[in-house]
Image (tube, helix red, strand yellow):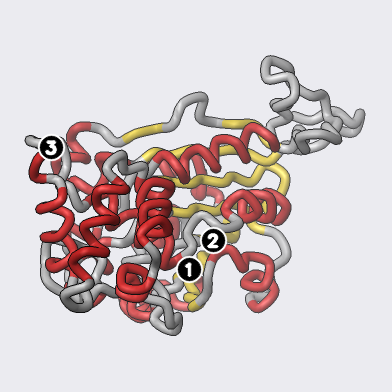
Amino acid sequence: MAENTSHQPVLVRETLRFLSPEGGGVFVDCTLGAGGHSEAILSASTHSRVIGVDRDETAIRLAAERLRRYGSRFSAIHADFKQLREILQSSEVQVVDGMVADLGVSSLELESAERGFSFRQKGPLDMRMDQRQELTAADLVNALLEAELADIIYRYGEEHAARRIARAIVRERQRGRIETTTHLADVILRANKALGRWRIHPATRTFQALRIAVNDELKDLDKFVDTAIEVLKPGGRLVIISFHSLEDRIIKQAFRLHAGQCQCQPLSALSGTRCPRCGADRRVEILTKKPVQSSEAEIKANPRARSAKLRACRKLTETPGGDEA
């Protein structure tokens, strides 16, 4: 497959630095996309194996073609990465050396007008990552009550004009169904004209909110972190890249719990015991005190990297004395 700069993985060097795949092992790319992170891991060591997972069947097909030269060292599975335990069982793998999850919508999806993720090009109002799913963004936009729409737009898009936008959508759909991305974007644009200049396109947060709702992106994200840490070998690494504050908040909180940072006493850390109230349990070392973000050079080469935040942790190992290191 010809290399496309828009299909470059975000924060790939930083991902490799935290995963440390040079010694080989089994790795899981939880969000395969175009296969960039998988390719970087496979290239780092001839003794590495990667299991690539994606809900998008098109991504599975294209990545499998791109990584075909790695033979049996790479396998692709069409599934939701939150089904991690079942995925590993089907691959006859019990524990892994490292895992990466890039939670953003892939460039493959954004650039395909017919997938309906982008307001910059006309396409059906779809937004399904998994085409086997029935619910689309058009279903939500044309069926939800005004209050329900406003709630989704505010909660998942953190859009302060959520009520104004929801009201405009309901008024517009009385004239006929809203079926395309550009139609919805125009409705949002007209609803926000009175607000003057914008730092980002007025439709950005609403499209994000609808995409999250359609794909149920935040559901069980914290439980995924729990499972991921369980299946890591001692010393194994988990790297997660998020693209908005809702995801980053969940990841940050989950990492803190597993690092033994008790939420009942925020300034204290547990010593190998589980807090019965908040669930804090010292099982990992957080490798990123603050989220790692892209350099200006990467952002210039790949604008998608601008909002990316990377967090990483390492599963602790037990010493003979029972202490963790």
Q: Earlier in the sequence, mark 3 or mark 2?
A: 2
Marks 1 and 2 in Cβ contact (< 8 Å): yes
**Could you tell me how many numbered marks the image carries?**
3
Q: Quadrant of the C terminus?
A: top right
The label on residue 126 is none
Image-based side of 254 in relation to 57, left or right: right
Does residue 178 sit above or below 269 in this rendering? below
Does residue 192 sit above or below 175 in this rendering? above
The label on residue 52 is 1
**Residue located 47% across and 55% down the image:** 45
Q: Residues within 10 Å of mark 1 (few under 14, many from 20)?
A: many
User: Which residue occupies the foreground of this view, 145 or 190?
Assistant: 145
Can residue 1 be seen here? The reply is no
Dividing the picture into quadrants, the one containing residue 269 is top right
The label on residue 195 is 3
**Residue located 45% across and 73% down the image:** 55
Dividing the picture into quadrants, the one containing residue 7 is bottom left
Marks 3 and 2 in Cβ contact (< 8 Å): no
Does residue 100 sit above or below 106 in this rendering? above
Compute the Cα span from label 3 to label 2.
Answer: 45 Å
User: Which residue occupies the foreground of this view, 17 or 78?
Assistant: 78
Q: Which residue is mark 2?
A: 28
Look at the numbered disc 1 and give the secondary structure of its residue. strand
Closer to the eye: label 1 or 3: 3
**Residue located 13% across and 68% down the image:** 183
Closer to the eye: label 3 or 2: 3
Give the residue type that dot 1 points to. Gly
Q: Residues within 10 Å of mark 2 (few under 14, many from 20)?
A: many
Give the residue type that dot 3 points to. Leu
